[in-house]
Image (spheres, grey):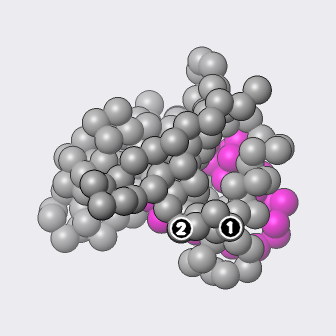
Amino acid sequence: MKLSKNLTLKEAVKSNTATRLGIDNTPSQWEINNLTAIADHIFQPIRDHFGVPIGVSSGFRCRDLNKAIGGSKYSQHMIGEALDIDADIYGKVTNADIFNYIKKNLEWDQMIWEFGNDEEPNWVHVSYKEGGVNRKQIRKAMRDSKGVYYTTEQTT
C-alpha cells in the first residue's frame, strides 16, 4: 500500500527490532490515515524537492515496539504522526539540508535535530498533526555523561 507517491506502508512500519522480538507492528486504520497525512505533507514534498530517494529509519511504532526501543511514552510515532528521516541511507542530500528545508518550507508539529554535531544531525525526527495545531517546535537531542537531554527552541 502506498502512503504517497514515494513512500509505502511497508517502509513506514519496518522495524528490525519488531521482527527480532516478534512484535506485531501493524497500524490501525486511524494510524494509517495519520501516516498518509505525514507522507503527503512532509515526506513527499521533501522527496519532490530534492529529487532523490529519502530514507525513513523509523515510522510507525506500536506501543510494545516503542517500549522495547526505549521511546518516549508520549511518542507521536505510536499514532503514526512522526517519521525519522535519514538522508545518510542514500547519501544524496544531508540531514541538515532536510531539516532546514522542512523548517523553512513545510507545515510541521515538531522537529528534533537528533544527535550528530552542530553541522549535521544523525537523523531528523519530524511530526505532523492532520487535525489540530502544528506547534513548529524545534528540539535538539544531545548526550552527555548523565544521558540524553533536549533543548527546545520555539519558532514562530
**Three-letter amino acid code at the position of disc 1:** Glu
Magenta run includes residue 52: yes
Which residue: 57% across, 78% down? 89
* Rendered position, 83 above or below 98: above
Residue 7 shows in this picture: yes
Label 2 amino acid? Gly
Q: Which mark is residue 119?
A: 1
Contact check, label 2 and label 1, Cβ < 8 Å = yes
* Label 2 Cα crowd, 10 Å radius (few <14 / some 14-19 / many 20+): some
- Residue 31, given in percent of the width and then of the height, sits at 43, 36
**Residue 26 in sight from this viewpoint:** no
- Residue on which the image places disc 2: 116
Which residues are drawn in magenta? 36-58
* 65 with respect to 111 (left or right): left
Q: Quadrant of residue 74?
A: top left
Q: Point out residue 25 in the picture as x, y percentages from the top left corner.
A: 29, 52
Query: Residue placed farthest to the top in the image?
Result: 132
- Residue in the image at 60% along x and 77% along y: 88
Residue 4 image position (x, y, % from top left): 66, 52
- Separation of residues labelled 2 and 1 (CA atoms): 8 Å
> Which quadrant would the C terminus be assigned to in this image?
top right
Q: Nearer the viewer, residue 129 or 36?
A: 129
Task: Tell whether 139 sits left or right of 99.
Answer: left
Mark on residue 152?
none
